[in-house]
Image: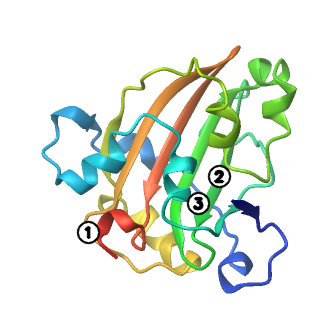
Amino acid sequence: MFKANATSSSAIHRQCDPLPDVTHIQALTWSDAAAVMLPEEYRYWLQDSGSLTAKLQQYTASLSLQLLTSGWQTTSYVDSSQLMRQVLLSDGQQPWIWGLTVVNALQLANEPALSNWSTEPLGVLLFADDDIGLRHFEVADFSQSDAFLAILPTWGCSATQPLWGRRSRLQFRSCQISLTEVFLPEHPMYGV
């Protein structure tokens, strides 16, 4: 079961600051996920090409989404033909995933089901189609980003090392979507 917490009064949902500057993401050292020596429990999460939403729902009955940006927005990180959104996925108490989605505005205009998707994880919609296929992942250690570590306390997270994130591209109907997902300190991947 999934619940949207856009109006929840819990502590995590009062702290709704988005990452103010996502340009630092490009400066991280990104590596092919298959080539990085990672513990098995990390590979289980970082290299899985299925729905992250469905996988998270196996670990909590209270998966919730907090929209950090007010829908799809343009920023200095993306050019004027692209839109982005930032979200937190939580187990109902602690944030587990920070997600960044970037999509071409013209392509998004042709997919009304996707353009109105603000209160639910994209995985619910994206993986309803069977033709998503395998994705290629790159991974990076976000604990190397001072900007990312600085925002963690506003989400109720403590800084930790490592702090793995992954990025990939996928095709959803007529839209090419870029996804970046960071596995936050309380995520089950770290044995919490």
Q: CA distance from mark 3 to mark 1?
A: 19 Å
Q: Which residue: 79% across, 53% down? A: 119
Query: Circles 3 and 2: CB distance less than 8 Å?
Result: yes
Amino acid at pointer 1: Gln
Amino acid type, residue under disc 2 in the picture: Gln
For the residue marked with disc 3, what is the amino acid?
Leu
- Contact between marks 3 and 1 (CB within 8 A): the answer is no
Spot occupied by residue 155 in the image (x, y as percentages of width and height): 57, 75
Which badge, 3 or 2, comes first in the chain's sequence?
3
Label 3: how many Cα within 10 Å (few below 14, some 14–19, many 20+): some
Number of the front mark, 3 or 2: 2
**Which residue is painted at 70% across and 71% down in the image?**
16
Q: Is 82 drawn above or below residue 144 in the view shown?
A: above
Give the CA separation, mark 2 to mark 1.
22 Å
Residue at image position (19%, 51%) is 40
In percent of width and height, residue 94 lies at 54, 77
Q: Is residue 119 left or right of residue 33?
A: right
Q: Is residue 84 above or below residue 176?
A: below
Choose the circle earlier in sequence order: 2 or 1. Answer: 2
Up the image or down, 139 lies above or below 42; here it is: above
* Label placed on residue 19: 3
Q: In percent of the image, x 61 and y 32: which residue is there? A: 127
Badge 1 marks a residue whose secondary structure is loop
Q: Residue 55 at x, y = what percent?
A: 49, 51
Mark identifier at residue 86: 2
Label 3 to label 2, Cα distance in Å?
A: 8 Å
Which one is in front in this view, the residue at disc 3 or the one at disc 1?
A: 1
Q: Secondary structure at mark 2?
A: strand
**Position of the C terminus by quadrant:** bottom left
**Image position, residue 57 (x, y; %):** 56, 58
Residue tagged 1: 161
Would residue 176 be found to the left or right of residue 35 on screen? right
